[in-house]
Amino acid sequence: MEAVKTSEKTTLQVKRFKPSENPTTNFFTEERGLKAWLTTVDHKKIGLMYLGAVAFFFALAGFLAIALRTELWTPAKTFIEADTYNKLFTLHGAMMVFFVLVPSIPAALGNFILPMQLGAKDVAFPRLNLASFYIYLIGAVFTFIALFMGGFDTGWTFYTPYSSDGDSATVIWVTLGVFILGFSSILTSTNFMTTIHKLRAPGITWDKLPLNIWALYATSIIQILATPVLAITILLLSLENIMDIGIFDPAKGGDPVLYQHFFWFYSHPAVYIMIVPGFGIISEVITTFSKKTIFGYWAIALSSLAIAFIGFLVWGHHMFTSGQSPVATTIFSFLTFLVGIPTGIKIFNWVATLYKGSIDMKTPMLYVFIFLFLFSIGGFTGIMLGALSVNIHLHDTYYVVAHFHYVMMGGTLMALLAGLHYWWPKMTGKMYNETLGKVAATLIFIGFNMTFLPQFVMGAQGMPRRYYNYIDQFTPFHQTSTVGSYVLGVAFLIILYYLVKSLMSDEKAPANPWESRGLEWQSTSPPDLHNFDHTPVVINKPYDYHRPMEEFQLGLAVEHNGHGEAHDVDVKETEQENS
Amino acid sequence: MGRLFDFMLPENMSPLTADYTDGLFHFINEASTIVLVGITIALIYFAIRYRRKSSDDKTPVITHNNKLEITWSVIPLFITLIIFSWGYKGWLNLKAVPDDAYEIHVTGFKWNWAVSYENGAQTLNEIHVPQGTPVKLVMKSRDVLHSFFVPDYRVKQDVLPNRYTYVWFQAEEVGESQVFCTEYCGTSHSNMLAKVIVHEPDDFKNWLEMNGGAGGSGDPVEAGKELVNLNGCQACHSVDGTPGIGPSFKGIWGKEESLADGSTVTVDENYVRESILNPGAKIVAGHDNVMTPYEGILSDEDITNIIEYLKTIE
Amino acid sequence: MANHSATHPAHVQHHFVDSDQQFESAKMGMWVFLVNEILFFGGLFTAYIVFRAWYPDLFTQAAQELNKLWGGVNTIVLIGSSLTVAMAIRSAQKNQKRGLELNLLFTIILACVFLVIKYFEYEHKLHLGIAPGSFWNPTPEILAELSHPKANIFFSIYYVMTGIHGLHVLVGIGLMIWLYIRARKGHFSSEYYTPVEITGLYWHLVDLIWIFLFPLLYLIE
Amino acid sequence: MSADNHTHHIATAKQLWTVGIALVILTLLTVVVSNLPIPSPLDIIVALSIALVKAFLVAAFFMGLYWDVKFNSMLLIGAVVFFILMVSVTLLDTLYRDDVVPSF
Ligand code: HEA
Ligand code: HEA
Ligand code: CUA
Ligand SMILES: [Cu+2]
């Protein structure tokens, strides 16, 4: 036992807690059965349920993508009608965005990891957390209702007046679905923000927060500020369909471009809701697998906040051709570029972290490398799209489609896969097959570029998006792209195969297979129902790989009531005390 | 010009509008390639050079370096400032229509482009322009949003139902350029195509005169046929019986049509009139209510002519 | 779990260390949620401002159709209810069970009064055919006063804003009833009154929104 | 601040009533002012200023921000700031659109 002096007044009694391998009880064993899962308030179980739901929607939306690509094998009809095609891409886009990417990292992985990285027993409002999950499902049910009523073909952006006249019943259901879904992310982020502020373990000051937490914090801020605007937009759109309130409908005196402002006020920040949590994962994985302190902790932490802030002021770059005013266009274009700076800072700091590291190319790290490459391409093409005159040419072509797949799939999804593989042993207590993992990652890399690189070319050549039919000149590009998507499909099936197989196997994963210094790894795998069998105390920064593991395995020796106030464990003093 | 990314762009047919765009496009591509290659080489080099040798490798404590941080913030900032000003300049150029531009009106509607010229000439899905002359298109939509895109000229502009928007270009060579609709507008969005047809200035004058002062032949059937062509009815209604978005016109007259609500109706003057002015009133079974109302667009006389024409399609 | 120490009072959930941490968390959580509410209404205010900037004369014209008197009365009613909620919290803090119940009851009554007045306002307008969206069908006399071609838009905004605000009042009444029942059962004390406090915050925000709705919709001319 | 010595602030009844009455008076004031013939942009400014004062009173005293941790005030201010950003940037478009008039 050693004494850590926390402040003038209190001294905490801390003790070393080494996580036991193969724990006899864990959160899987302690509350069992379907009912326990469905009514659980445990953030880990909720996180896993989210993960299952997200995987389901991803597989579904991915399957739709395969159908889209197959249809595009030839111009005009290959196997489905134009109307079906239009419904498919709408559903593909809407599902990937609202049901997969927005909740994927925060609500699925974040839910599991965030309280553990803070050394908390749960999020601040566990019941609210479960409620968010069910709200998410209800949102999904509404969308499926719309689907069974014949589907909707508005594009995921629901532009008026197309979305507000014509077949409105289905649009009402899906917009209400998205409205409900919005509450799910609002509640999750409210929960996260409060947890980060109020439930940190003793010693976790703001400068010791893992970068993953900083990223989730920035994400929560964006979600809290942007999602309500989506909610009201989509509600107005529903009302437009239900009773022609006319605010967005030119036939009734409204303005369709105003709708676009409303929509993108949410949906541009939303793309940062999707990518910023991915940035968090990259920071965690890259340090673990180079066994090295992160380079530029504050630069990475604060650039997330900078992205979050600037990200709010650039929405109009989706509207350069919409007929918005020249002043607005100019300002939006200018601000758009500013987002590239903090993003670049992150990329460069990550690369610098590798310098003189001890780099272990395990599957998660492989995904990080793929991420850095693909996301950079996605980002650069974003800059291309932000350039005013070029945007006029590229807007609403496949160039945009390629851009956002590079950032959303090449960025967020690769980060998600990195995180999934990284935390898989922690979450399930099982280890996946490393070789298959690398094979799948390589296939994804090949398939992805094959699918989306040709889209840059044909987009710049003039191939518009949301096109069922196309002129012959684009056939070779479309066919390469289609083949690429099949390769992707195979790769995902391999992932599905080895992950499921690892669940079935008896082999147990060690508590900390990667020798990470992260707090979440100082618990057993899988963790105890209350995450730790002690109240952890943190004296080092999260990536201090030069310090021995023992210093990361400290906890309160005696139950202490001052937990909430002990945030200010003084680093310097403790260091002196220890050495 | 033989630049690295030339293969990505279609031929430049309107240098006055396209040159800025193309130059910037190439610049960004080349700059990005350099940075991307740099990052990639660093990644691969580090991965090999610093690969883990044993599980107790020691790594140095390098926490940050403010000089580096500033370097890699400021350099990209400068690059983006260049990109912004270049793009802005090009865009101002796209917005600034030359004073002597020749004006043509374009109306987008599901799923056609109707074009009208100063002397009353009208065309559908064909925009005839004189070569070497700046042309300004003033555009409007009749129903939902559309967007007018000519890749060869690097111009694009959304077309809105409640106000006018414009683009301009100056085609330098005689020939044709493809027009796409790039704002999603429903079933046949991908078939909402048109061509810009560039004539030599004299040819253009002739063409204009030949087609000026529309209508006029006096024969109702001919006039009806003309109207059906110009108003884009054939985007949805075939005249040869092939099924389309709307019912085919072939053999329509006097037909017993079953409606979506289960009732039936005989196709006569009143029904056709109603179907044109207020298509939503009676929906034919098996079709959706997607037809744009032609109220205010087709006059009574026009409709009478169309009816005469419909009677002849058997 | 060792963490369930005997020192935990019953109302403190297991993942909190003490009552204070729980209280502060709940309060912060509510504030974060209120940020949401502000931006949610913010969207509507944006629509309001945009259309007002486009058609100033429409707004002056249409505001004539709204009844300043009842709007003002309603403002005062809501302010009163905010006061009673604040008093309710004070009673809880001072362990005055009776005061808490009474103040909650006053709040519920005032909120109902607000809705009743609102109902009559709506009723009157609907009667004149000043209805939202596709129900827009003003009587000829009204049409003469509301000559602006986009009058329907003003009333769409009016109905959506006040309607959503009204829904919030309705939800507030539900919450107050729930609090009242719990107060009757003696769930609250100076040690634990978190639900009263955070519901109070919500209620004040509903009041705040109205403070802006009232001059914007009824008064500006 | 430790759990034991920290007590929540309790506003006095007098404080609350004062604020309540002030709010009522301000409401009456804003109605009265709206009936005065004040020229166009000014009347909006006056009405909104009164509303802002009322909002401040509610937030500071009824909602207790005056006595609360600063962060909660920051949340409120942040929300308002972002709302203003949203409005002003949207207005940059809606107020400055260029009108194209066809020449024939
Ligand atoms: C995860 C999602 C995500 C992310 C992170 C981004 C990131 C960016 N996006 Fe993207 N975008 C989308 C998702 C995303 N986007 C989607 C879904 C659409 C289409 C929506 C639709 O219409 O359906 C879209 C569309 C879109 C458009 C509109 C295109 C159009 O329709 O006309 C524009 C235009 O400006 C744009 C720009 C950008 C920019 C500048 C960034 C920047 O954030 C990128 C910053 C990153 C870098 C720049 C790379 C790293 C930086 C360096 C290595 C430093 C060196 C850099 C320089 C010298 C510049 N995006
Ligand atoms: C997260 C975002 C995301 C992701 C990952 C993808 C993934 C893919 N997308 Fe999509 N896409 C969008 C978001 C996304 N898309 C959006 C927002 C639009 C715009 C919609 C609009 O215009 O409105 C769009 C539009 C879009 C288009 C343009 C349609 C058009 O404009 O006409 C195309 C065409 O090629 C396309 C293709 C693909 C392909 C081939 C994939 C592939 O990468 C998919 C690969 C995935 C699979 C094949 C699934 C396999 C899964 C399993 C087999 C189960 C295994 C399960 C687990 C491991 C959990 N997408
Ligand atoms: Cu018209 Cu797409
Ligand atoms: Cu964007």
Image (tube, coloured by chain):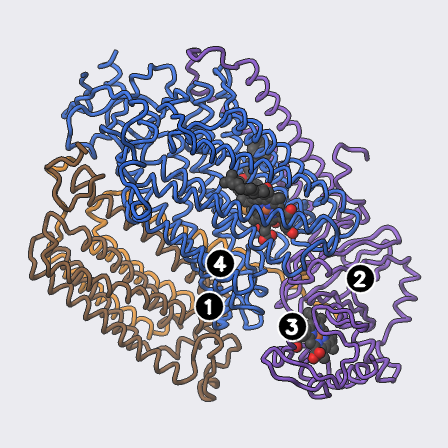
Q: Nearer the viewer, mark 4 or mark 2?
A: 4
Q: In the image, what residue occupies the spot 29% across and 77% down? A: C69
Report which residue position mark 2 lands on: B102
- Amino acid type indicated by mark 2: Tyr
Report which residue position mark 1 lands on: A239
- Amino acid type indicated by mark 3: Gly
Image quarter for residue B307? bottom right
Say yes or no: labels 4 and 2 on the same chain: no
Q: In the image, what residue occupies the spot 59% across and 60% down? A: A153
Q: Secondary structure at mark 4?
A: helix
Distance of label 1 from label 4 (alpha carbons): 20 Å
Badge 2 vs badge 3, beta-carbon distance below 8 Å: no
Image quarter for residue C207? bottom left
Lower position in the chain sequence, tag 2 or tag 3: 2
Of residue A188 and residue A305, the one placed in the foreground of this image is A188
Can you give x and y, in whole percent of width and height, for residue A493 in the image?
A: 56, 38
